Amino acid sequence: MQHALDRLDRRILALLQQDASLSAAEIAERVGLSQSPCWRRIQRLREAGFIRAQVALLDRRKLGLNAQIFAQVRLSAHGRAHLDEFTAAIREIPQVLECYVMMGETDFFLRIVAADIEAYERFFFDTLSKLPGVQEIKSTIALSEIKHTTALPLEER
């Protein structure tokens, strides 16, 4: 059964999305609760699966990953027999940050990072194009980033 979020739960989640390093005491103060009930709410949200993980978000450019590429991958009709093998391989490739199964002409949509275009070209020929069942890859390079967030909208419905 899905747990219903109240206004305080949403405020707590919003604060954690902005800064997961906040202590329960800091969150409690900002949402108007005492520390123990706030800590219990956070634990309940974790146990219910609303909080999947707490991670550090890194700056890809500072790490030298200056190119961001979106690739549309189509498998051959025969390649669809290798669907599980393809998805397992994609999960193991660190340059692929996101992968979605699509409906339509494209089978998969990938977000990939690389040091530069030359590094992506090597990745394309040495790794991506050699994955099981791949028939066609259309790559689009992002010139700049207008918006990137991991924060989900939490307004009440």
Image (tube, rainbow, N blue to C red):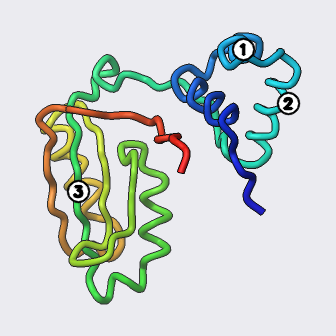
Q: Position of residue 69 (x, y in %)?
A: 21, 45
Residue beneath the point at 38% across and 34% down? 149
**Label pair 2/3, CB-CB below 8 angstroms:** no
Front-most of residues 62 and 79: 62
Q: Position of residue 111 (x, y in %)?
A: 31, 48
**Label pair 1/3, CB-CB below 8 angstroms:** no
Give the numbered dot on residue 90. none
Q: Position of residue 27 (x, y in %)?
A: 69, 17
Q: Going by the image, does 130 lie left or right of 91? A: left
Which residue was labeled with disc 3?
Answer: 71
Which residue was labeled with disc 2?
Answer: 40
Q: Is residue 68 above or below residue 123?
A: above
Distance from label 2 to label 1 (Cα)? 13 Å
Residue beneath the point at 21% across and 77% down? 105
Q: Is residue 49 above or below residue 67?
A: below
**In terms of secondary structure, where does tag 1 sit?**
loop
Residue type at the position of mark 1:
Ser
In what quadrant of the picture does the N terminus appear?
Answer: bottom right
Q: Residues within 10 Å of mark 2 (few under 14, many from 20)?
A: few
How many marks do you count on the picture?
A: 3
Residue beneath the point at 20% across and 32% down? 146
Which quadrant of the view contains residue 62?
Answer: top left
